[in-house]
Image (cartoon, helix red, strand yellow):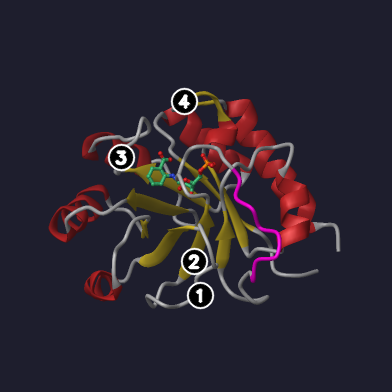
Amino acid sequence: MGTPLFVKVCGLRTERDVDTAVEAGADAIGFVFAESPRRIDAGTARRLAARVPDGVLTVGVFRDQPLDSVRALLGETGMRAVQLHGHEDLAYFDALRPDGRTLIRGVAVRGEVPRYGERGEDVLLLDAPVPGAGEAWDRSGKQLPAPGRRWLLAGGLDPHNVADAVRAARPWGVDVSSGIETSRGVKSPELITAFIAAARGAETVS
Ligand SMILES: O=C(O)c1ccccc1N[C@@H]1O[C@H](COP(=O)(O)O)[C@@H](O)[C@H]1O
C-alpha cells in the first residue's frame, strides 16, 4: 500500500458541514477569507475551527491580500495552515514561514505546470484558472509533479470523477469545493461524505 491520499474539503461555513467532514475522515478543512461566496468572518472561522480535532488541518484560504491582515486573521482564528491562492511571491511566503504553519501554494494552471517548491511551500496545489469555479483544467500532456512530491489536485472534482482523476494524475492529495455543493456556497453533507469515500476508494486500486 502506498501513502494514504490526503483529502481536503474547502469553503465550509457551518457547524454541520465541519462535523460531517471530520466524521467522514477529511485530512484538512479549508475556510475561505478571500473574496468569494464562501467567505466567512473571523468569528465564524474561530468558532468552526474550534470543533476540528488536532489531527485535522484547518486551512485559511487567501488571495492577494495584505500580509498584515492575513497574519492577523490566522492568529485570531487559530488556523494551522495557510493557502495562498494568488500572486504571492517568495518574500511573502518567507514572511509567513517563521509562524510555523503549513504553507500551501495554490496555483491556477494556465500553461506550464509550476515546479514544486519554487516558493518554499510545503504543499503545492494545482487548480483551474478560476479557483472555486468547479471547472477542471486540461492535464493532458502536462508535466505533473514527480511522485512523492506533496501536491494537491483541485478544480472541478466531485464524488463521481475524483477516483478516476486520482488514478490518472497520481496526486499526493485532492481538494474540492464546488463538487460538494448543492448551490454556490451551500455544502451538502451527503456530497462531503461521498467525496471523501470516493477519494479514499481510489487508494485501494494500484
Ligand atoms: O472556493 C473559493 O471560492 C476560492 C476563492 C479563492 C481562492 C480559492 C478558492 N477555492 C479553491 O478552489 C479549489 C477548488 O475549486 P472547485 O472544487 O473547482 O470549486 C480549491 O483549491 C479551493 O481551495
- Residue at image coords 56%, 25%: 188
Element under disc 3: helix
Residue ID for mark 2? 124
Which residue occupies the extreme right position in the image? 206
Tag 3 or tag 2, which sits nearer the N-term? 3
Mark found first going from the N terminus, 4 or 1: 1
The quadrant of the image that shows the C terminus is bottom right
What residue is shown at x 38% (from left), y 66% (from top)? 103
Mark 2 vs ligand 1: CB under 8 Å?
no
Q: Secondary structure at mark 1?
A: loop
Q: Give the extent of the magenta segment.
A: 136-143
Location of mark 1 (residue) = 116
Q: Which residue is mark 4?
A: 184
- Marks 4 and 2: in contact by CB < 8 Å? no
- The x, y position of residue 139, in whole percent, is 66, 58
As helix, strand or loop, the secondary structure at mark 2 comes to strand
* Residue 42: x %, y % from top left: 23, 40
Front residue of 191 and 164: 164
For badge 3, the amino acid type reads Ala
In whole angstroms, how far apart are the C-alphas of marks 2 and 4? 25 Å
Name the disc covering residue 45, or none: 3
| Residues at marks 2 and 3 touching, judged by CB atoms closer than 8 Å | no
